[in-house]
Image (spheres, grey):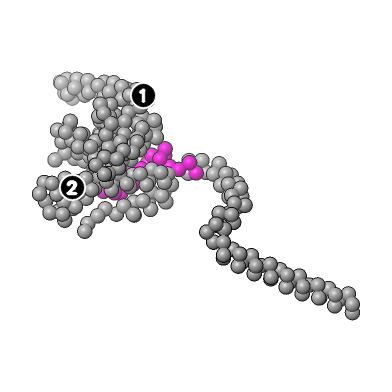
Amino acid sequence: MPRPNFIGLRRELLHSGISPRHVYRAISELDEHFEDLVYAGLEDGRDRIVAERNAMDALGDLGAVSRAMRHQPELKGWAWRHPRLAMFVYPLACIAALPAVPVIAGVQHAPQIARWAICLLVGGFVTALMFLVLQLSITLT
Amino acid sequence: MAQTNPPFMTGVPELLLLRLLEQQEMYGYQLVRSIRQVTDDAISLGEGVIYPALHGLERKGALKSRRKAVGGRTRVYYSLTRKGKQRLADLQQDWQRIQVGITSALEAPAHA
């Protein structure tokens, strides 16, 4: 069944810095438009394959859609429009979010986190014990 | 059949979109059909490129969009803002000036 390569278009647009909001909406609109064209073809009495082929022709080259979006700077995400500000804000946001990560992750992965935490504690205790024995042996000899 | 997006078409899709959306809110497919209808198929757009144009106009504040469920499907409807109305008035003025200029150039006797 011939269908436009919306996945490729989505990837291309996201890689070129178009705001995800515009990318996902444009893809969903193109998909709906394609369905409308196919439906119109079927209503005209064409069989499905012909209707889909005609719909693809009518929709046009997706490369042209991509170029038209990439040539509009206002459709780019804010990080692409203000890269210096993004370089400052993103690391700060990540640092600010760090304390919340174990809490968020812990809700879903509580047993794994508990296992890892116990392993780390046991490992730390064994290491501390070894250092203590070593220190005592140095002191007493 | 009309050529799709010839070079002199710059600004024409924008003018048509704003003019059609001035009358009522529409979604992409409906707009393409309306453009065909009002221009008697003289202007044939690659239908997919209407969306970058709509998104660009929305970002510039000339249009606003809203999702609306119609017949079990969700459509994105576009309508004109106050800024869009002003932009349409400016474009219409520009277009009429160009039209007058071209008409007088075509009617004037050719110079050597």
Q: Nearer the viewer, residue B25 or B94?
A: B25
Residue B45, quarter of the rendered image: top left
Q: Position of residue A3 (x, y in %)?
A: 24, 55
Q: Is residue B48 left or right of residue A24?
A: left
Q: Nearer the viewer, residue A75 or B73?
A: B73
Vertical order, A48 against B56 (above or below): below
Q: Position of residue B22 (x, y in %)?
A: 28, 26
Residue B96, quarter of the rendered image: top left
Instruction: Name the residue beneath numbered marker 2.
Output: A39
Vertical order, B2 against A123 (above or below): above
Q: Chain of mark 1?
A: B
Q: Position of residue A115 (x, y in %)?
A: 60, 67
Residue A69, quarter of the rendered image: top left
Visible residue check, residue A7: yes
Q: Residue at x 89, y 77 (%)?
A: A140
Q: Amino acid at mark 1?
A: Arg
Is-magenta flag for residue A63? yes
Visible residue check, residue B43: no
Q: Position of residue A127 (x, y in %)?
A: 73, 72
Mark closer to the observer (1, 2) = 2
Q: Main secondary structure of the magenta part?
A: helix
Q: Chain of mark 2?
A: A
Quadrant containing the C terminus of chain B is top left
Tag of residue B98: none
- Cβ atoms at labels 1 and 2 below 8 Å apart: no
In the rendered structure, which segment of residues is drawn in magenta?
A: A61-79
Q: Residue at x 22, y 23 (%)?
A: B99
Instruction: Name the residue beneath numbered marker 1.
Output: B82
